[in-house]
C-alpha cells in the first residue's frame, strides 16, 4: 500500500481521505506531508488533521529502497485514531515482498473505453 500517488499529492486542491472511512464524521481538513525527492514523489510520511487540529491519521515509511531511480517503500506503518481521543483505532503494517521490472500492461478494451 503506497496510499497516494505522487501526482495526486502535487495536484492543487487535493484532499486526502482517511484510509478507513467507517465513520463519516471524521473528515481531514489539512495535512502535513513529505515525499521522496524523485520523479514519482511517493509519500514518505504524512499526518492528517481534523478541524480542531487533532491528528486523525499517521502514515510513515519505515524502510525504503531505490529501484531504477525511484524510491519505493519497503515497509510502512499507518495508524488511524479514534475521533474522541488520541487512542489508535486502526493500525496497519505494510511490507513490499517483490519489486521487479515488467512488460507494459495490456488493458482490455472495456477498460480503455471507460477511461475516455
Image (cartoon, rainbow, N blue to C red):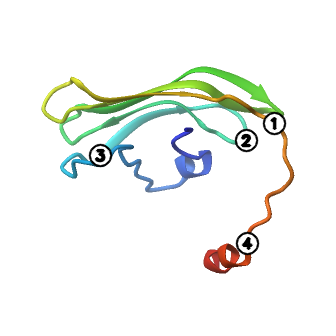
Compared with residue 24, is residue 84 higher up or lower down, i.e. above or below?
above
Q: Are marks 2 and 4 in contact (CB under 8 Å)?
A: no
- Badge 3 element: loop
Mark 2 surroundings within 10 Å by alpha-carbon count, few (fewer than 14), some (14 through 19), many (20 or more): few
Q: Which mark is residue 100?
A: 1
- Mark found first going from the N terminus, 1 or 3: 3
Q: CA distance from mark 1 to mark 3?
A: 37 Å
- Mark found first going from the N terminus, 1 or 2: 2
Residue depth check, mark 4 versus mark 3: number of the one nearer the observer: 4
- Mark found first going from the N terminus, 3 or 2: 3
Q: Which mark is residue 29?
A: 3
Residue depth check, mark 1 versus mark 3: number of the one nearer the observer: 1
- Badge 4 element: loop
Judging by the rendered image, the residue that carries numbered circle 4 is 108
Q: CA distance from mark 3 to mark 2?
A: 27 Å
Judging by the rendered image, the residue that carries numbered circle 2 is 39
- Mark found first going from the N terminus, 2 or 4: 2
Q: Residue at x 84, y 46 (%)?
A: 102
Amino acid at each position: 500500500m503506497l496510499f497516494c500517488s505522487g501526482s495526486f499529492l502535487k495536484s492543487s486542491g487535493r484532499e486526502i481521505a482517511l484510509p478507513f472511512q467507517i465513520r463519516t464524521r471524521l473528515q481531514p481538513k489539512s495535512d502535513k506531508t513529505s515525499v521522496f525527492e524523485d520523479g514519482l514523489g511517493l509519500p514518505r510520511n504524512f499526518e492528517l488533521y481534523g478541524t480542531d487540529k487533532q491528528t486523525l491519521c499517521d502514515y510513515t515509511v519505515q524502510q525504503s529502497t531505490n529501484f531504477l531511480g525511484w524510491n519505493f517503500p519497503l515497509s510502512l506503518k499507518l495508524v488511524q485514531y479514534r475521533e474522541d481521543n488520541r487512542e489508535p483505532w486502526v493500525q496497519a503494517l505494510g511490507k513490499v515482498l517483490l519489486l521487479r521490472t515488467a512488460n507494459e500492461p495490456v488493458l482490455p478494451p472495456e477498460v480503455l473505453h471507460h477511461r475516455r
